[in-house]
Image (spheres, rainbow, N blue to C red):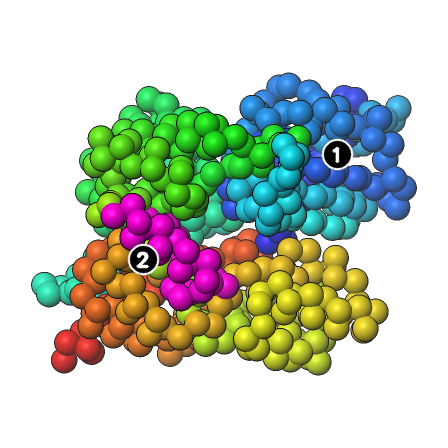
Amino acid sequence: MPNGLIHSDSLRTHPDGFAVSLTIPWYRSLWLSSVVKLELTVDGEPVDPADIVFELAGTRYALDELAAQTEVLWYLQEHPLLIVRRDAPFALGETHEVGIVGELRLPYMQIAPGQAGGPGMYVPNHVRESYPLVVTDTDAPAPALAPAGAPAPAAEGDPFKLGLTLYSASAEFRAGWYDFDALLDRVAELGIGPGIEINAAQMIPSYPYVDEEFVARWRAAFDKHGFDASSFGANLDMGRNRERDMTPDEEFEFSELMFRGAKKLGFPLVRIQSAKPDLLRRLLPIAEELELDLAYEIHAPMGPNHPDIVKVRDTFDELGSPLLGFTADFSSTMHSMSPTLLRAVRRAGLDDAAVEKLQEIWATDAPMRDRQQEFIGYLGSRDFDPGRLGSFAHLSFNMHGHVDPHEWADIMPQIKHVHAKFYDIDETGQEPAIDYPELVKVFVEGGYRGYWSSEWEGHAFAELGEVDPLVLVRKQHDLIRASMRALRA
């Protein structure tokens, strides 16, 4: 259930009737206003929305009240309840078929800005699930983690420093297998520091503000393990209010708040989401005051020479600040679709012919949305409901780009950070969809000497518990180090 609202332990006892414990079906925290739709069926019968309340942190909301909750954060590790009023409460051990349809509006993934003061268009995340669930009153236990041997150590003369983004363990953190301290303990045990990157909306309970409690936990963990803060990921939740987009002043205030939080935590760099010239002009004095580099992320399906990125490059040239640069995400430069994704769409019901067609369309040079619509049209011709794929119909194209990796050389002096994106490590120690030895060669020859932050994004496609992502990061570090040393030899 990689994109699931419900899991095996979701059906709960409750004095009002029963409850369904929810997991946010995304990698980061979202505002309650992001919840567009929640529909519930039990044993094949629709539940009247008037009989459902949504309870988060002890506060209850009617479903039609969620759209207005622009200041209430559904933190990634929180599991709110859908409480259903019922005359005869469910009893422990009963089994019921629970179906749920959900839709989220991702407030930082804008498709088009609003017009005349209205709301913009944002990427939706659709969830449709149905499972037989046993009524319980406890959370499922976290699995035992396998020990790992000693990692290949860093060597004198390695051109890159290695680390990871904690985003790599999104699903496990969301499920509660780790709290923040235990997650950093596991990173240290596996030897996959020293660079630590975070996505603020994922890790910080007081997002977008960094409170003193989080600062204290952060500093204690860093003192304990000798980590380095590498990159602070800052989203811009332009669609937080369902009625309208953020105003320019709100975008500035939201961004400044996160910049100051990044400084509190000791980060030298903020990964920014917006490169609007007017916004950057206002933010540059803040970045100069705080001594922060600002790195705009180049992510699939775009590459360094995509027209939209060329506009960003032109903006940076116009502003002429040495603080401005890019985060290179290797999702942009893949040579094939990830086997991890292909396994997921097969589980969702695609047969061999559809999987082959998906890869054929992906490999064309058509714009991302055109490829997506072509594939959805193909599914329609096969009488296959694209809704069965959930977000995969979009993510298959949005998260996998096929730009030539040598294009990174065109902007190498402006690359300030690297997301060493990967989805799997095969039995030969290679990433089957991304050519890491070639990427190492491009970046070494281009003179890059910053952090490569490992980013396992297989959690978007893999089942929870299917792999241990932090062990995969260890294997990826071995691959990167072997590639660096082979190049030196």
- Mark 1–mark 2 Cα distance, whole angstroms, equals 49 Å
Residue 256 position within the rendered picture, expressed as x and y whole percent measured from the top left: 36, 30
> What residue range appears in magenta?
295-320
Look at discs 1 and 2 and give the one toward the viewer. 2
Q: Is residue 68 left or right of residue 182?
A: right
**Res 176 visible:** no
For badge 2, the amino acid type reads: Val
- Residue that appears at 69% across and 20% down: 60
Q: Label 2 crowding class (10 Å Cα cut-off): few <14, some 14-19, many 20+? A: many
| Number of the label disc, if any, that sits on residue 375 | none
Image quadrant for the C terminus? bottom left
Q: Is residue 55 magenta?
A: no
For badge 1, the amino acid type reads: Leu
Q: Which residue is mark 2?
A: 418
Q: Which residue is mark 1?
A: 92
- Residue that appears at 19% across and 60% down: 449
Q: Is residue 303 magenta?
A: yes
- Which SS class for mark 1? loop
Residue in front for this viewpoint, 131 or 119:
119
- Residue that appears at 75% across and 34% down: 92
**Res 113 visible:** yes
Residue 299 to residue 320: above or below: below
